[in-house]
Image (cartoon, grey):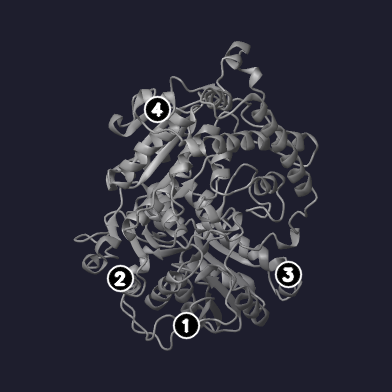
Amino acid sequence: MTNRTKETGISGIPEQRRTAFLELMLLSRECDRRSGIVLRQGEAWFHISSAGHEALAALCELLDADDLIFPHYRDRALMLARGMDAEAQARDLMAKEKSHSAGRNMSAHFGHRPGNVFSIASPTGSQCLPAVGAAWAAQLRGRSQVVVCSIGDASTRQGEFFEALAFAVERNLPVVFLVSDNRYGISTPTDTMSPHALGLLPPERTHSVDGADPDAVHAASHAALEAVRAGQGPVVLWCRLDRLDSHTSSDDHRVYRSEQDIARMHDPIDLFAARLTAEGLLDAEQLERTRDRLAREIEEIYDRVATEAAADPAGITDHLFAPRPTTEPDAPHTKPCGGTMVAAVNRALATGLARHSELVLFGEDIDDPKGGVFGFTKGLGEAAGPRMTNAPLAEATIIGAAVGLAAVGMRPVVELQFVDFAGPAWNQIAAQLTTLRWRTASAWQCPVVIYAPWGGYLPGGGIWHSQSNESLFTHLPGLHVVVPSTPEDTEAAFLTSFTADDPTLILLPKHLMRRRHEPAGAPAPAHGARTLRHGTDATVVTWGNGTELATDAARTLAADGIETDIIDLRWLVPLDRAAVAASLRRTGRLVVVQEDNRTSSYGAGLISELLCADDDFYSLLAPPRLVTREDVHVPFHPDLERAVLPAADDVVAAVRSTLA
């Protein structure tokens, strides 16, 4: 044992691992040094140094192979300890084709699937909620896995850090929050603004650690992991250390730090090397030889990687989604169901629970006896058991935890009470959920199913319960978006999504959800558009509540001998463009009906998409029309709501205008 561990009575890095661990630290530092050189040579574009943070890798000495790390961008040494070697890190720096992200993610945004290291997304703190989701998965499966969520001290002011900590405490999850407190958030001192400084962290779960001392980190990690593995819930290791370099290669810390402040910094390599020398495990000559050897090896590796190919731009859209099957699967239900959309959701969820042991239901108020504010999950509690549970009133937690569940192989199906409330979850949707497959070249995938009530035409909704904001979500590459309008299509959308390898958003029109339907004929294909009515005079394309407007308008027009093709898109992503184009070529006239507002909407984009193709453009006999809400919010009073939302008469007028 070292003098330090003899004095404290706690374990440090074992003697047989001490010189090897110092070499790991030196290797990390040399990778940082060489990265700076490569950057100046023009072979890289951005670099984040981990200098000063190397001692934190002592925690990895205690992790099992199946434990997970949700890393921070200064975790180079941790990555080396988990198997992301210098060659992989060089490829990461230079964004090479063989890098973990195929050149798509920023340098120092580490990820290493073989070492159970999750991929970093840039929004700070966004790894916290997926981390607790993965820990929840371990708990549900009865596994002894531990999740390490590494984060900088400045990032702990993000609300998602607090949500993650609260969720981990609430559910007693096996999570270690490894906080690197280097006293700066870029240029802003954090001494008076971090949660630790403000006394906001639970003291019984928070341990202050000398983060520049590998033995102290090892000892604190040993105690934390023992507690977490024993089922005592999460631990926060608040590690004080120094950031020895500027924030990034785009920064110069001399602008905002005094010479005295920089000179006072503690280098963990110097500290640990001196300790090993005092213990007789190292001498100055050995240290110098190791430095020289690593410098030569890293120079050779980085020079060789610099000659490797970058990714082919022709493949840049690969990995947005899982490869499509060569044949369209059979419709996932065996008989037309009829009834209501609410009942169809309930049936589909019951079927999913029975068929898929990894399926988990999560959302606000979904557990019995309430079964959600719309009753989608009512009566499913007994069959679901611990796989269905109420979420806190925190949409970011719902989606973020689902990302973590899905990433480790679970099948989360989550309810947002209204799509209007997706705002707090937007960071997780846009930064994690929809980018994970693409930014890891399919090493990680995220098959989350999100469903949410959507749209207006239900009096009393107002601004925050009547949004039809599908264009916000269809704008995000990597997300399937479906808007069913019948019980059959609703059930099919859910059952199909339960086996999909990518995230799916199912938007459920509130106006249509409780309307009873007679069972349809043969079930429609699971994907693509559905033709609701055939005609030769005009094509009306719509989805969701627009199907009712279009059908009502078609009856009025038919009385005057005008027959319309009505196409219910159902799936907005992927778009069944072929069905729309085929109808347009028959009729020569196009009307798109939506309830979203006009500017930058999905309907406007659809028209633009069709106009950009010569064959479709020259099929037009009249300018296309967009029936839409103008750029105004949906008001509360029913009369005002009716005044702003499109009506069947508006569809009639639009069709007539194309025939004039």
Q: Look at mark 4 in the image and give the residue it sits on.
A: 5
Q: Look at mark 2 in the image and give the residue it sits on.
A: 346
Task: Looking at the image, tell me whether mark 4 or mark 1 is earlier in sequence order.
Answer: 4
Q: Quadrant of the C terminus?
A: bottom right
Amino acid under label 3?
Answer: Ala
Residue 629 in view (yes/no): no
- The residues tagged by marks 3 and 4 sit, at their Cα atoms, a distance apart of 73 Å
Relative to the observer, which residue lies in front, 457 or 132? 132
Residue 613 - label? 3
Amino acid under label 2?
Answer: Asn
Task: Looking at the image, tell me whether mark 2 or mark 1 is earlier in sequence order.
Answer: 2
Q: Look at the numbered discs 2 and 1 and tell me whether their residues touch, using CB distance below 8 Å.
A: no
Tell me the SS state at disc 2. Answer: helix
Task: Looking at the image, tell me whether mark 2 or mark 4 is earlier in sequence order.
Answer: 4
Q: Look at mark 1 in the image and give the residue it sits on.
A: 524
Question: Which mark's residue is nearer the viewer, 2 or 4?
Answer: 4
Question: Which mark's residue is nearer the viewer, 3 or 4?
Answer: 4
Residue that sits furthest to the front in the current view: 280
Amino acid under label 1?
Answer: Ala
Q: Residues within 10 Å of mark 3 (few under 14, many from 20)?
A: few
**Image coords of residue 424 (percent x, y):** 42, 45
